[in-house]
């Protein structure tokens, strides 16, 4: 009798506006803390849009691993990143013009393409370091590049991201 009830499929809006979206937003704080706690990064200016992009990658990966299609995963992650960037800029009184948002979304698309490729290489064990290195370099502000925290990042980033991704995947 209990097997007759079919679990209702969540809509894209359910993910964006529901608990999944809330947890994705919370992941941003965890990501900021991770990078701020790397040796030598205590006073670094970490670009919030890059943190949002990484959160978007985690959203994408958790949805895709949770049996969502690539298109569904891409749409949901892009919407969550867009919403985060709009809310963040509004909270700090920064005008986010359509041109600025368009640029950020193009930058996000490039970031996602690189991350998906590099993370696939990591999972296939063909390149175990490039993903972590790419993230390490991306999070740093232009003109303020350091190698401080590099080894720590190489050793801890993947397990840290895997934990955040698993928390999100549990909500899929």
Image (cartoon, rainbow, N blue to C red):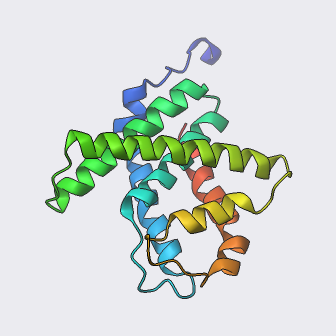
Image point (51%, 77%), residue name: 145
Image point (56%, 16%), residue name: 6
User: Relative to residue 54, is residue 81 depicted above or below?
Assistant: above
User: Relative to residue 77, is residue 119 depicted above or below?
Assistant: below
Across and down, in percent, residue 128 comes to 80, 59
Q: Quadrant of residue 164?
A: bottom right
Image point (71%, 71%), residue name: 154
Across and down, in percent, residue 150 comes to 65, 78
Q: Quadrant of residue 28?
A: bottom left
Across and down, in percent, residue 76 comes to 45, 33
Q: Quick one: quadrant of the C terminus? A: top right
Q: As drawn, is 41 to the left or to the right of 94?
A: right
Q: As drawn, is 152 to the left or to the right of 85?
A: right
Q: As drawn, is 71 to the left or to the right of 159?
A: left
Q: Residue furthest front?
A: 143
User: Relative to residue 127, is residue 77 depicted above or below?
Assistant: above
Residue toward you, 119 or 163: 119
Across and down, in percent, residue 158 comes to 69, 62
Residue toward you, 98 or 32: 98
Residue 95 in sight here: yes
Image point (65%, 43%), residue name: 116
């Amino acid at each position: 009798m209990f097997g007759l009830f079919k679990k209702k499929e969540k809509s894209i809006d359910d993910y964006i506006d529901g608990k999944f979206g809330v947890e994705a937003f919370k992941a941003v704080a965890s990501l900021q803390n991770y990078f701020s706690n790397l040796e030598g990064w205590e006073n670094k200016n970490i670009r919030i849009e890059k943190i949002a992009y990484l959160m978007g990658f985690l959203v994408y990966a958790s949805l895709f691993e949770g049996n969502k299609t690539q298109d569904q995963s891409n749409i949901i992650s892009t919407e969550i990143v867009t919403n985060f960037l709009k809310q963040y800029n509004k909270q700090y009184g920064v005008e986010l013009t359509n041109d600025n948002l368009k640029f950020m979304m193009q930058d996000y698309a490039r970031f996602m393409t690189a991350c998906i490729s590099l993370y696939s290489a990591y999972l296939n064990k063909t390149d175990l370091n490039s993903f972590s290195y790419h993230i390490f370099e991306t999070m740093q502000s232009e003109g303020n590049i350091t190698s401080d925290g590099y080894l720590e990042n190489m050793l801890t980033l993947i397990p840290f991201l895997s934990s955040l991704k698993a928390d999100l995947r549990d909500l899929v």
